[in-house]
Image (spheres, rainbow, N blue to C red):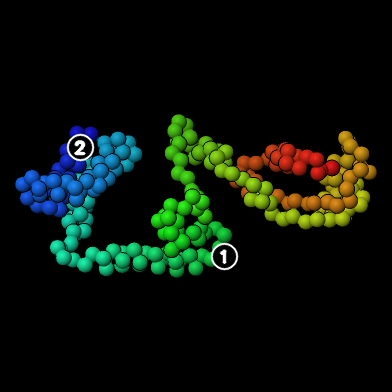
Amino acid sequence: PIKVIKGVKDLLKKCVIVAGNDRLSVQANENATLLFQCLVRSTLCTKFVSEEYRLSSEAFEWLIGEIETRFQQAQVNPGEMVGALAAQSLGEPATQMTLNTFHFAGVSSKNVTLGVPRLKEIINISKKPKAPSLTVFLTGGAARDAEKAKNVLCRLEHTTLRKVTANTAIYYDPDPQNTVIAEDQEFVNVYYEMPDFDPTKISPWLLRIELDRKRMTDKKLTMEQIAEKINVGFGDDLN
C-alpha cells in the first residue's frame, strides 16, 4: 500500500500542465489537473490495486509509466485548434458505431442501440433509455461461484412469457379428450385419467403455447412457476 500511495503521488507531481512555482501558476495547474487527479486517485487506490486489479510491483510501475507517457502525449501547444480535434475525436467513433449498428440490423443477439441515438440519450439524459443496463457487484459466495451468480441473475432479471415461448397457435378443439393435435394426445390421455373438473364445460377454443426448453433451462424456470403466473393473471378467463 505504501508503494502504491508513493507511486501515485510521484505520478501526479510529474503531470504538470502549467509550469511555474509562483502562486498563480500553482493554482492554475491545480485547477487544470483537478479532475485528472481525482480519476487517478480513485482508480489507483490501494484497495483496488491490491485486491481487485492484483497488480505486481512490476505491473504497477509499468502502469504508472504508461499513464505519464499518455498524459504528456495528450498535451497540445498553445494556440492549437482544439475544436477541430474534438470534433474529429467525437465524429469518428460515432460514425463507426453507426456503421456497426447498420451491420447488426435484424440480428437479435446484438445490441443495436449505438451510434448517434445512443449519444443523444447520454447528452439529453433520457429518462427512458432504449436499452437500459445494470452492473451489479456480488458479495459473499456468489462473488466467486459462477452457478450462484447465475442464480442471482435469474432472480433479478425480469422475464416475460414471450421470452421463453417458442411458438403459439389457436385451435378449434371441440372434443378435448380426443384432441386434434396428434402429438399432444398422449399426455392429454394421462391428464384426463383423473379429471378434477367437468370436461363438458371446457371451451372448444384452445390456445397452445409451446415453451422453449433451452430458454427455460437458462432462466431456471419450471412449468409449475409459469402455470402459477398464468393462473394469477388470467384465472377467471381460463377453464
Q: Which residue sits at x=20%, y=42%?
A: 8
Give residue 26's position: percent from left, percent from top: 11, 46
Amino acid at dot 1: Gly
Specify whether 119 is left or right of 40. Answer: right
Amino acid at dot 2: Ile
Locate the C terminus and report the quarter of the image it occupies: top right
Q: Which residue sits at x=91%, y=43%?
A: 201
Locate the N terminus and report the quarter of the image it occupies: top left
- Above or below for 199 versus 93: above
What residue sits right under mark 1 in the picture? 106
Looking at the rendered structure, the secondary structure element under dot 2 is: helix
Q: Residues within 10 Å of mark 1 (few under 14, many from 20)?
A: few
**In which image quadrant can residue 139 be found?**
top left
Along the line of sight, the residue nearer the viewer: 189 or 164: 164
Q: Is residue 112 visible?
A: yes
Q: Which residue sits at x=55%, y=40%?
A: 156
Labels 1 and 2: the sequence-earlier one: 2
Give residue 59's position: percent from left, percent from top: 24, 46
What residue sits right under mark 2 in the picture? 5
Specify whether 104 is left or right of 162. Answer: left
